[in-house]
Amino acid sequence: MHGVTMAALALAALLAGTGTGSAQAPAEDFSSWQRLVPHFPSTGGGGVMIGEYRPVVRGDTCTTDFTATEPNGTIYRNTVVFDAVPTSGGILCTNGRWRSLDNDASGTTPFRVFFRDGVPYASP
């Protein structure tokens, strides 16, 4: 399988999911969420590492560019945009839509980020 295609599939596996928009996020307990760090293993597995993940809230969206690095060192540059929904004394970044900056790969992600007092926390 071609490297770019394999990486796109790995990234799609990492970020796969579906989401539906809603006017208001349901009440949720965000106190168990861990502080978001900019580098973490992909939940999609395969040894892929996510890097440079630093979302910022701007109006009604949260955005960040990030990298997906394969175990062989190949780096893919991506961007993600979330809906920014006020909830529980903060902002929930949900319904993420990502796309590759290197090729035409794109998809959605169930990954979410919650901002409270400017500090980002990652969904478990």
Image (tube, grey):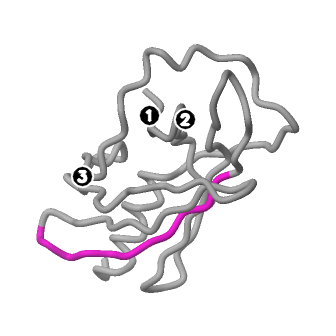
| Gap in angstroms between the C-alphas marked 2 and 3 | 26 Å
Q: Based on the picture, tell me whether residue 27 belongs to the magenta stretch.
A: no
The residue singled out by tag 1 in the image is 121
| Gap in angstroms between the C-alphas marked 1 and 3 | 24 Å
Residue 123 position, x and y percent, is 47, 31
Q: Nearer the viewer, mark 1 or mark 3?
A: 1
Using the image, determine if residue 109 lies above or below residue 23. Answer: below
**Mark 2 or 1, nearer chain start:** 2
Q: Secondary structure at mark 2?
A: strand
**Going 28% across and 60% down the picture, which residue do you hit?**
51
Q: Nearer the viewer, residue 24 or 59?
A: 59
Q: In the rendered structure, which segment of residues is drawn in magenta?
A: 72-82
**Going 37% across and 60% down the picture, which residue do you hit?**
10
**Mark 2 or 3, nearer chain start:** 3
**Mark 1 or 3, nearer chain start:** 3
The residue singled out by tag 3 in the image is 46
